[in-house]
Image: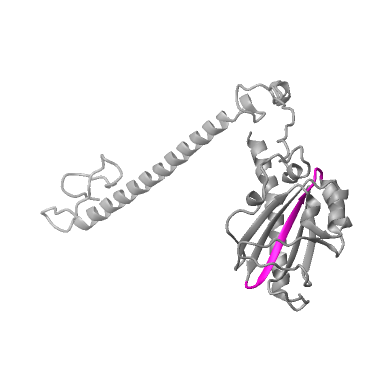
């Protein structure tokens, strides 16, 4: 067996650095086998990529394992109970019962003053009183109706301001004063009489004893003609607090009032309602003054 030029030549291994590269025996110029060299280089590059990828995966697994070990160590046997570290057991933590919240005595605001209390007896009802105070101004408006104010009167002789059975009722129950005022609208006139007593009980009793013949005497003058002196008129009776109040309404031309004369009825009702409001306002004003005083 003969060998090529240069003596015996070992088989070339691309993975052995000391091995010699085999040359083609096809020619005397010993030209390298470029195809073989390219194939060997490609093989080496692939192997390096495999090694690099495998090494990175191993490194990632190692880092993950290290983190997991750190987490386990932070939550290990040193704090197996699950409570925050270095805190006392729950039995040793002070409870709220050791420092109870301060207690206060229950308090309540005083009840508001009742306005009616101030108009139910002469002892509390001390505000100034007159027909002009109770019925101020020159006219009265109720809804869309305007009544022109006529004369006023004020007397301590209660019987003189009444007729029929009313004088006896007022006297028997201790009436101390009667205030009167008249209003007129389109030929219909009305007189309101307010009888004053010392107590609510007296006023309530006087209202209960009054009958259909218990009538306040009409008041004329200042543009109001005489009315209800002989003709049939419509009257009302009410009481609030220590006040009993009466109305008489009719035509200024002397015509009798019938149930069909709604204007007369509405006039009497309007003045009775206004009188009630004025007495109630009197109580409210005195209650407010007492509360703020």
Q: Is residue 188 magenta?
A: yes
Decide if residue 246 is on the left or right side of residue 129: right
Residue at image x 77%, y 40%?
122
Residue 150, x across and y down, in percent: 63, 61
Residue at image x 18%, y 50%?
4
Extent of the magenta region: 186-199
Q: Is residue 144 above or below residue 103?
A: below
For the residue pair 206 and 162, the one nearer the viewer reads as 162
Magenta: main secondary structure equals: strand
Decide if residue 139 is on the left or right side of residue 172: left
Q: Quadrant of the C terminus?
A: top right
Give the colour scheme shown: one colour
Residue 256, x across and y down, in percent: 76, 76
Residue 82, x across and y down, in percent: 65, 31
Residue at image x 70%, y 65%?
190
Q: Is residue 292 magenta?
A: no
Decide if residue 146 is on the left or right side of residue 279: left
For the residue pair 277 and 215, the one nearer the viewer reads as 215
For the residue pair 47 and 28, the one nearer the viewer reads as 47
Residue 223, x across and y down, in percent: 61, 65
């Amino acid at each position: 067996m003969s060998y090529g030029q240069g003596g015996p030549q070992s088989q070339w291994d691309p993975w052995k650095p000391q091995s010699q590269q085999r040359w083609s025996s096809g020619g005397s110029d010993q030209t390298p086998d470029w195809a073989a060299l390219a194939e060997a280089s490609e093989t080496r590059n692939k192997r390096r990529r495999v090694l690099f990828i495998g090494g990175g995966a191993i490194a990632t697994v190692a880092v993950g394992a290290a983190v997991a070990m750190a987490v386990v160590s932070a939550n290990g046997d040193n704090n197996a109970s699950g409570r925050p570290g270095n805190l006392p057991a729950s039995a040793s933590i002070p409870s709220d019962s050791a420092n109870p919240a301060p207690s206060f005595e229950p308090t309540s605001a005083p009840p508001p003053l009742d306005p009616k209390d101030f108009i139910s007896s002469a002892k509390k009802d001390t505000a100034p009183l007159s027909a002009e105070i109770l019925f101020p101004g020159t006219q009265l408006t109720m809804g869309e109706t305007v009544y022109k104010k006529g004369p006023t009167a004020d007397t301590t002789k209660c019987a003189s301001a009444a007729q029929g059975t009313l004088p006896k009722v007022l006297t028997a129950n201790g009436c101390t004063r009667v205030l009167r005022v008249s209003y007129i609208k389109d030929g219909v006139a009305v007189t309101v009489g307010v009888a004053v007593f010392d107590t609510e009980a007296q006023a309530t009793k006087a209202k209960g004893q009054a009958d259909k013949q218990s009538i306040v005497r009409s008041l004329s003058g200042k543009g109001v003609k005489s009315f209800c002196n002989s003709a049939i008129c419509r009257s009302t009776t009410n009481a609030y607090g220590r006040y009993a109040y009466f109305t008489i309404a009719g035509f200024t031309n002397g015509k009798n009032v019938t149930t069909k004369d709604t204007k007369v009825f509405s006039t009497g009702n309007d003045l009775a309602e206004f009188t009630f409001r004025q007495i109630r306002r009197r109580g409210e004003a005195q209650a407010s003054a007492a509360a703020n005083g």
